[in-house]
Amino acid sequence: MVLLHVLFEHAVGYALLALKEVEEISLLQPQVEESVLNLGKFHNIVRLVAFCPFASSQVALENANAVSEGVVHEDLRLLLETHLPSKKKKVLLGVGDPKIGAAIQEELGYNCQTGGVIAEILRGVRLHFHNLVKGLTDLSACKAQLGLGHSYSRAKVKFNVNRVDNMIIQSISLLDQLDKDINTFSMRVREWYGYHFPELVKIINDNATYCRLAQFIGNRRELNEEKLEKLEELTMDGAKAKAILDASRSSMGMDISAIDLINIESFSSRVVSLSEYRQSLHTYLRSKMSQVAPSLSALIGEAVGARLIAHAGSLTNLAKYPASTVQILGAEKALFRALKTRGNTPKYGLIFHSTFIGRAAAKNKGRISRYLANKCSIASRIDCFSEVPTSVFGEKLREQVEERLSFYETGEIPRKNLDVMKEAMVQAEEAAAEITRKLEKQEKKRLKKEKKRLAALALASSENSSSTPEECEETSEKPKKKKKQKPQEVPQENGMEDPSIPFSKSKKKKSFSKEELMSSDLEETAGSTSLPKRKKSSPKEETVNDPEEAGHRSGSKKKRKFSKEEPVSSGPEEAAGKSSSKKKKKFHKASQED
């Protein structure tokens, strides 16, 4: 009898279960299907043979990717070879995914079954899995499923940032929507401003230019010769500018109030800003297409290539399509209508917007569309699967389409595809080498900048670390300096003092000594009785000044130099006393002579 085993893939690991000897027909009865929901009855049908847990979340992600792609992972291979019976003909393995079942049957030789009874059993296993495995709780199983789901989705979404085609899909959709909106808004401005200046509609056809002129002109009665230059700049045509000026003088439009003009001008400015944004978006789309699909954009243009990618869903889906599907992509309604009514199928879809089909004759439009779809399919595959995308193949394919057009018109035989592709391969290798060289240079520059930044950070951190002990030393030295400054006011033991202190004080003393001298001169004129009293008031100064008088007679200049360089044992009070006593004696002699 054939033993039925069931393989169950969970976020925590693989589980291999065996069904007890029960007839397959009885398992399909409704009573048995209801017993799947009951844990006790389900244990009577299924037993756990082996459980292989995943070592980490990374291993779980690898196994999930392998199962989704239909590849037998080494962990799954080890589990099946270890716990399944050696006689493979007597084993029937039930799996949920037909892809992995086909891979197991091809690589390991076990007969696999999907659907029917297996789906019901897997439903019960999924419901009671945390009870079948010892040590596994419902909460931990849910957390494992959530974590694996997030990592699996993140791995599927993660692609090269520079080659993501989602931005192209959104950009071309927004571009089409902007075209519709700008057209609608421009018609509204034409109708609104046409009440005031109806002749402008016939002169200017472009929507964006009309909105700029409506914003600039405003009230047509204020338009004069001074604004003619600005009109020429906006219209890019002197004749049109002159016609606008002439029409404004003889216009049949109604007069309009100032507040209505303000509203028209504000709405016109919005339309102008939208048209400018549309141009910038088109530039962005062209740059993005040159990065993602350079060959396709070189073959049929950026706009048509972006519409093909958006309609297919992605560049990968477009690369998987055959040329016949690419040819009618965008004309699905016409195709199904033709199939339903048994009429003629459409010859072209979105590729009709390329210039090649418009340039071909009516009888050759179907031929050139088929040939162009073939080349588009090749270009999309090259862009999708090449490591370094270049526009070389697209340019060569475009040349082939041009040659085919000339062949239809003149009969000139085009080059063979083999020769063209050989030339393209040589040029593509050179272009790829140049691109890789540029990328390497950019990477080197980036590494140099990174090294400089790290070196600057390391230097700054070292300076900060070295400045902290210096600051501690300065804080410890500050109170010491304050303590040293206090005794400087008093003379030291050897009689020497700080030269900066006495000079600053002597100047102040000199200023006071002059005032005293002035008062002494006034007293001397009154009488000489006050002189001995002054001598008694400073007897110490006289005793110190006696040797100084002799030095003063020999040379006052030498005395000054000596006092600046090496101050003799004299404090600030003594220096002030010396200078005052000298001047007093001079004035005393002069008064006696008088």
Image (cartoon, rainbow, N blue to C red):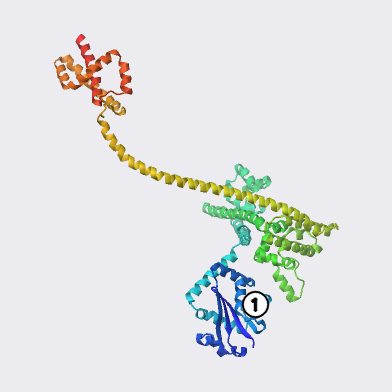
321 over 25 or under it: above or below: above
178 over 449 or under it: above or below: below
Look at mark 1 in the image and give the residue it sits on: 101
Amino acid under label 1? Answer: Gly
Hey, which residue is sitting farthest left in the picture?
A: 529
How many numbered circles are shown? 1
Instruction: Locate residue 148 relative to residue 365 in the image: left or right.
Output: left
Q: For the C terminus, give its image quadrant.
A: top left
561 over 37 or under it: above or below: above
Q: Is residue 10 visible?
A: no
Q: Where is residue 141 shown, x and y percent of the image? A: 50, 74
Other residues around mark 1 within 10 Å, as few (<14) / some (14–19) / many (≥20): many
- Most foreground residue, 401 or 271: 401
Q: Residue at x 59, y 90 (%)?
A: 29
- Most foreground residue, 517 or 367: 517
Q: Is residue 403 visible?
A: yes
Instruction: Locate residue 402 relative to residue 445 in the image: left or right.
Output: right
**Residue 64 lies in what quarter of the image?**
bottom right
